Amino acid sequence: MEGGGQRRDPAAPPGRPQGECLQLLLRRSQEAKNWAYCPYSRFPVGAALLTASGEIFSGCNVENACYSLGVCAERTAIQKAISEGHTSFRAMAIASDMGENFIAPCGACRQVMREFGTDWDIYLTKADGAYIVKRLEELLPFSFGPEHLKEV
Ligand code: THU
């Protein structure tokens, strides 16, 4: 689904944020982008994570002079939420300065998101606020998760 306005979608799956809740999530991802520490890539990213209880945890990318230690915005947000006791998530919005393309999470972040379920929503945005929404299952099909460890 594509969007950018404030209309409610009657066909939206239950649990998907709508209206003001969705607008706040999108805005929080843009605000978090302003805190990005990215002196090496100069590619700021922000993420905002909506918990099942309705709280929002935001994060930005945090780079390091030892390049490989940099952390993406999505994982910053997830680690903040987990470390404050939240493990059930409804949606994440991701923001960057890209105008032509929707920001898409890297493979490592998709796997970290998947740890917490496959049936939640990821809002991929452009700099002008336009977005598309994807189920995590769509972003990481045929995935490996914690339940598989119990099969052996
Ligand atoms: N980055 C994110 O934080 N999230 C994404 O979805 C894509 C990439 C960061 C990692 C690095 O700090 C910079 O953007 C350039 O790759």
Image (tube, rainbow, N blue to C red):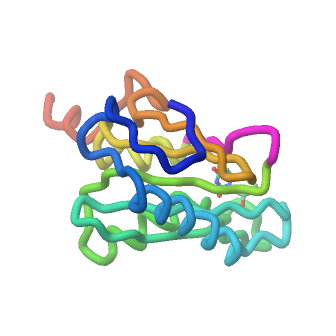
Q: Position of residue 150 (x, y in %)?
A: 14, 36
Q: Quadrant of the C terminus?
A: top left
Residue at 45% over, 53% down: 92
Residue at 34% over, 42% down: 120
Q: Is the magenta region chiefly helix, strand or loop?
A: loop
**123 horizontally vs 57: left or right:** right
Q: Position of residue 96 (x, y in %)?
A: 71, 56
Q: Taking the image as four quarters, which one is ligand 1 found in?
A: bottom right
Q: Position of residue 149 (x, y in %)?
A: 21, 37
Q: Is residue 10 above or below residue 69?
A: above
Q: Which residues are magenta?
A: 99-107
101 or 41: which is nearer to us? 101
Query: What is the quadrant of residue 26 in the picture?
Result: bottom right
Residue at the extreme front of the image, as rendered: 7
Residue at 26% over, 46% down: 15
**Residue 101 on the magenta span:** yes
**7 horizontally vs 41: left or right:** left
Inspect this view and state whether residue 104 appears. Answer: yes
Residue at 71% over, 69% down: 63
121 or 144: which is nearer to us? 121
**Residue 115 on the magenta span:** no
**129 horizontally vs 148: left or right:** right
